Amino acid sequence: MSEPGGPGAVRAFLGLGSNLGDRAANLQRAVDLLSARPGIRVLRSSRVYETDPVGPSQPDYLNAVLDVETTLTPRELLEACLAVESAMGRVRDERWGPRVIDVDVLTYDATTVDEPGLIVPHPRMGDRAFVLVPLADLDPSVPKPRPGPAGVRPFGPSLAVDLEPD
Ligand code: GSY
């Protein structure tokens, strides 16, 4: 497999969310596990935001967006995200229910994908302030939402990114 940074590497944005347990530690662990996977290099993190839950009544989320470089295909990148969720104990039972971690493929370069189980860009990202606000930290082409959009509050600085993981 070619290495991130080399030819064939593309940029992708991943969305992270957690609303169970130590939410900030969960987001950071997801960054560390993604960084440790072959074919993924986490370059930057947005700041962390606390967000009102979209969907059924449940605890507030922490959300962030990551800018990654990858040599994986979109499907392989999705599988890597699902593997990180599983490693962190996520059980996919209730579709809109609370979760230790959620890792979504938001974009994959300028590529569009529409396959069973994988739609890129993420079909709901344009409606979700909990995605757009952190994404605007990283992508200047995303209009900066007006200050303090409903339900999205600054929580903490960017997640730590180790550009030289072991
Ligand atoms: O779609 C990801 C999981 N999720 C979230 C989330 O990450 N943040 C907020 N604020 N609400 C959510 N509802 C669901 S489901």
Image (cartoon, rainbow, N blue to C red):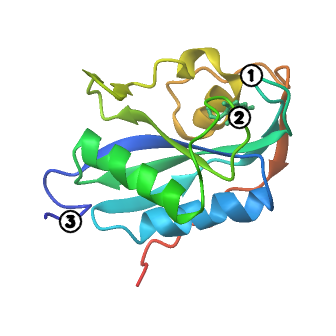
Q: From what the image shows, is residue 131 above or below residue 100?
A: above
The answer to whether the residue bearing label 2 lies less than 8 angstroms from the nearest atom of ligand 1 is yes
Residue 31 position by quadrant: bottom right
Residue 111 position by quadrant: top left
Name which residue type carries label 2: Gly
Q: Residue at x 20, y 65 (%)?
A: 3
Q: Is residue 160 left or right of residue 146?
A: left
- Identify the element where label 1 is drawn: loop
Name which residue type carries label 1: Gly
- Badge 1 local density, few (<14 within 10 Å), some, or many (20+)? few
- Quarter of the displayed picture in which ligand 1 can be seen: top right
Residue 128 position by quadrant: top right
CB under 8 Å between discs 3 and 2: no
CB under 8 Å between discs 1 and 2: yes
Residue located beneath label 1 in the image: 55
Q: Which is closer to the viewer, label 3 or label 2?
A: 2
Which mark, residue 97? 2
Q: Is residue 85 left or right of residue 28?
A: left
Which mark, residue 3? 3
Q: Nearer the viewer, residue 140 or 59?
A: 59
